[in-house]
Image (cartoon, grey):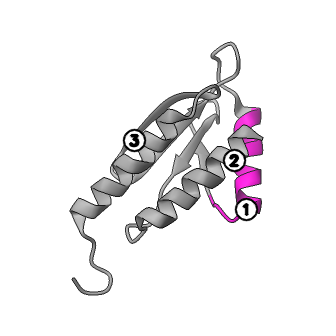
Amino acid sequence: MRHGECDIGEERLVVVFLVVLLQELDGAIGDVRGLGMMIGVELIDADGGPDAALCKRVLSSCRERGLLLLNCGSYDNVVRFIPPLVADEGQVRQAAWIFEETLSS
């Protein structure tokens, strides 16, 4: 494989790995959904409603730790993961760890 080419099998493995890691987190996560490398993680409050304030805090804290994420959704409570196609498993693990640590704090 040449530089810049993507191994689709490896890409799918990385995406599945990220989704499984995110679904294991409980409490503030309402849903994990996505298509391909784009994954949305819905953040909810204790009553199950959208939590835009938590989303804003998570994005800010992740950015301080070197993880750039976006928010989306009708209520601005969904964190968007859009890793580059060249992301490897180690980078995905690091991103998931930063996200989990941020969400837990």
At x 36%, y 56%, the residue is 14
Q: Residue furthest top?
A: 47
C-alpha gap between disc 3 and disc 1: 24 Å
At x 76%, y 52%, the residue is 60
Q: Residues within 10 Å of mark 1 (few under 14, many from 20)?
A: few
Residue 4 sits in quarter: bottom left
Report the disc number at residue 34: 3
- In the rendered view, tell whether residue 83 sits above or below residue 57: below
Looking at the image, which is closer to me, 100 or 43? 100
Query: Which residues, given as a range, are shown in magenta?
Result: 53-68
Q: Which residue is mark 2?
A: 101
Looking at the image, which is closer to me, 15 or 90? 90
What secondary structure is marked by label 3? strand
Q: Which residue is mark 1?
A: 65
Is residue 59 within the magenta segment? yes
Q: Are marks 2 and 1 in contact (CB under 8 Å)?
A: yes
Q: Earlier in the sequence, mark 3 or mark 1?
A: 3
